[in-house]
Amino acid sequence: EAGVTQFPSHSVIEKGQTVTLRCDPISGHDNLYWYRRVMGKEIKFLLHFVKESKQDESGMPNNRFLAERTGGTYSTLKVQPAELEDSGVYFCASSLLPGVGTGELFFGEGSRLTVL
Amino acid sequence: QKEVEQNSGPLSVPEGAIASLNCTYSDRGSQSFFWYRQYSGKSPELIMFIYSNGDKEDGRFTAQLNKASQYVSLLIRDSQPSDSATYLCAVTMGTYKYIFGTGTRLKVLA
């Protein structure tokens, strides 16, 4: 069974440019999460989808960040325009619905974003 | 106060010793508690989960939860160099909103 896949694995862009990160969750996982890890800091919650609906987007830093999950399958996270402080590793994770299984989050390998 | 706090380390223990990793959390309503291991440059992977007060053992790993003290810990017995990694404590708040600590870097010295 395929795990959570993320693309690209690494992106280097200049300040002011746009980047779109993609996440394909494990098939059948209705919960999808985006997290960001900045060097030396915690893995910070950005938002949570249940199927195609945004359940909680309280962690999104500002309106330069836009997340979508078309048809409840894959998700994209767009940063436009990118700023220096957006650099970090963006993790996507998925899980089964609450009450099903252990509640374990399955993580992708992450997309490392470097804004110059 | 951070929602989930961990000592960033590094915590250095000799091979074969017990490594003790600690985590405190702020939300008394938290229901589920997880320990993830993350090797450098890799994604986090689940080591243990615990929902009820007390101890839960799985092989060399024991998770301990004390909800009254808002404290969860992970013990690693017979530590091996391959256990060297960052250990992340995660707590669910609300309906499956997972909040992570900064992680504790563990070094097991051969």
Image (cartoon, grey):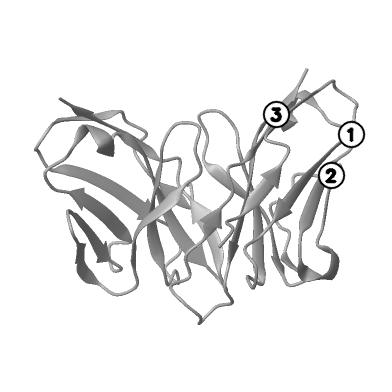
From the viewer's perspective, tell me whether residue A11 is left or right of residue B16: right
Where is the N terminus of chain A found, in terms of image quarters?
Answer: bottom right
Secondary structure beneath dot 2 equals strand
Secondary structure beneath dot 1 equals loop
Crowd around label 3: few <14 · some 14–19 · many ≥20 (10 Å): many
Query: Do the numbered discs 1 and 2 sit on residues whose CB atoms are within 8 Å?
Result: yes
Q: Amino acid at mark 3?
A: Ser
Q: Which mark is residue A78?
A: 2
Q: Amino acid at mark 1?
A: Thr
- Estimate the spatial distance between the alpha carbons at disc 2 and disc 3, rounded to whole Å: 13 Å
The image position of residue B96, as x and y in percent, is 55, 69
When asked about the image quadrant of residue B103, the answer is top left
When asked about the image quadrant of residue B58, the answer is bottom left
Residue located at (11% from left, 43% from top): B78
Same chain for mark 1 and mark 2? The answer is: yes
The residue nearer to you, when weighing B28 against B54, is B54
* Residue positioned most to the front: A1
Q: Which mark is residue A87?
A: 3
Q: Which mark is residue B82?
A: none
Same chain for mark 2 and mark 3? The answer is: yes
Query: Do the numbered discs 2 and 3 sit on residues whose CB atoms are within 8 Å?
Result: no
Q: Amino acid at mark 2?
A: Lys
Where is the C terminus of chain A found, in terms of image quarters?
Answer: top right
Q: Tell me which label, 1 or 2, sits earlier in the chain.
A: 1
Q: Chain of mark 1?
A: A
Q: Which residue is under mark 1?
A: A18
Crowd around label 2: few <14 · some 14–19 · many ≥20 (10 Å): some
Q: Tell me which label, 2 or 3, sits earlier in the chain.
A: 2
